[in-house]
Image (spheres, rainbow, N blue to C red):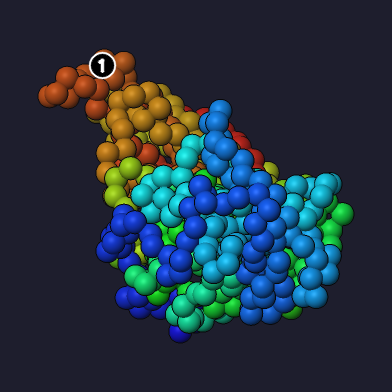
Amino acid sequence: MPIRCNGVVFVKRFLVLLLLIIIAVLPGEAAQFVPNCPVMPVSGVKEGMRGSMLTVLKGTKPVSLPIEVAGVIPEGNGARRRILIRLSPSKEHPTGRVAQGMSGSPVFVGDRLIGALAAGWVFSDNSMALVTPIADMAGVFLGGGGAVTTAGASAPLTVEGLSASAASRLSGIADVSPGAGGAGDLPLNGPPFSPGEAVSALLVWGDVNMFATGTVTAVSKDGRFLAFGHPFMEMGDVGFPVARAYVHGIVDGSMSPFKLASPVAMVGTATQDRPDGIGGRMGYFAPSVTSTLVFRDADGRGERRVKNFRVARDAFLSAKLIEGVYGGLIDDQWGRKGEGSAVVTLRVDGAGLPGGWTRTNAFFSGTSIGDELLRETAEIIDTFLTQPFKEVFPIGFRLDVSVTREPRLLTIENVIVSEDAAPGGRLPLEVVLRPWRKEPIKKRFEVVIPRAEDDAPESCELVVRGGGVNSMSQTAIDEGWKAVDGFDRLLAEMGAADANNELVVELNYKKDSKKDDKKSKDGRRDDEEREFLSETKSRRIKEGTLRISKTEYVVEGFMKRVINLGSPK
């Protein structure tokens, strides 16, 4: 079954995929890991011993390379015990250099496993490397692995499916480099791992892959595995998918060689990410967050391009990953950076969201429209994933983006209104708007003058503005009178926020001071300043003092008119 989902059916396929998912702690997860091969404790390892290391140099089949134990480094000053080895030149690997991606390669003395290759050095003797003892690696399933380690830092990440420039949007998460393979569907439930095989731990997969590649160290009879010999992201309990990797070859870099590899088939899930390595279970697949980008270049042929990807499920990492991938995909799909306009619709589907939740907005930037259109999207996605009320899962995001180089701007030039009106009456008005470098257009509205009793003001103020100009604020929240206290309230207030593509007409007036001082039964002032924004907008639209017209432009400008009030009608 492919992991890819297409179009509007992505959530349905996502729910089907969940039938394969494990959500609770796996049976036996905290049990001691027992490799399915003989092992040698580090106390038995001596300088001068000769052995072998299993790793993939090309393709998917491991080869055996000769090694010699150069020493055993004792623990002390917070450091863990490590074994120093030297990789010898051989027919299979004439240079005898340790390459990035060999991390996790099982090292044997005779037929006994002593540990996993974990770290080498750059600008130095690349034949030397440190080995993490197998007993330390096995401890990852017990929540251990040591707070301090010399086994190496978190793994460098490769990004496929994005250009090098677009992939740089993910550099804030970790060091990233472009890969050689093309991203796409990854089949599920590949055959179980064998020691020495290349393995990729993934943060993003689908039309974009973001992963680190290492080597499988050991497997056990209960279906678990160990790999890397050092951390992936060093995040503890995790749910990152792992895939068998195909090694295209070893690149002989100036700092150190590295394997160029691509994931080819999902095998299981890494459940532990500790200083001494990663561990997990084969045949099980962790929950993930589904994301879709539907992109249209309005300056080109206008065709829709759909990209689908998944990200590892983590409340605080997923949003950063989604934002980075969306940004990179938009950069590549448009093929340029710089000024432009965009209409953006973000749809969220998931548990507790019958019918989904949708927000549409328009954006313009004279410097970088890709950055501008993502700010609000990133904030909303982060809110859904980190909000404190309930876990929304399964969850999927779909971002529809239509981009043009043209400044899609509407500027308010004039507001035409009669000078007088009466309480309880209707006030017609006309707004003159100018599209960028085009002839003006006119839009008509009608607002209602509230009927007042003994507190009727002599005048009121008519405001016409763009939705992103002097936006209505959450005064009740900002001043501490109310707080968002539930998931439904959160959705309502996110949906109530003004949008840049709105033309807003509002009629404002101040009540008589005597009435303004009146209190409700609970002792609080019962006025607009203590309403949620969604409540204020709903009430004012119903009473006729607020009108909102949505456009496909960014509306700019702010104008006022004073309306003199006569006798009530």
Name the foreground residue: 47 vs 332: 47
Residue lying at the far right in this picture: please name it. 254
Residue 201 in view = no
Q: Residues within 10 Å of mark 1 (few under 14, many from 20)?
A: few
Residue lying at the far bottom in this picture: please name it. 1
Q: Quick check: 310 above or below 511?
A: below
- Placement of the C terminus among the 4 image quadrants: top left
Name the foreground residue: 495 vs 265: 265
Residue 122 in view = yes
Q: Residue at x 21, y 22 (%)?
A: 524
Q: Residue at x 54, y 69 (%)?
A: 111
Picture coordinates of residue 181, whole percent (x, y): 71, 74
**Count of all numbered marks drawn on residues in the image:** 1
* SS for dot 1: loop
Judge left or right: residue 217 versus residue 394. right
Q: Residue at x 56, y 28 (%)?
A: 77
Name the foreground residue: 431 vs 303: 303
Judge left or right: residue 189 versus residue 197. left
Q: Residue at x 38, y 36 (%)?
A: 422
Picture coordinates of residue 314, whole percent (x, y): 44, 52
Which residue, given by chain and number where applicable, does mark 1 sit on? Answer: 517
Q: Quick check: 459 above or below 97?
A: above
Picture coordinates of residue 75, whole percent (x, y): 54, 36
Q: Quick check: 373 above or below 223?
A: above
Judge left or right: residue 169 versus residue 38. right
Picture coordinates of residue 564, whole percent (x, y): 46, 29
Mark 1 is on which residue type?
Answer: Asp
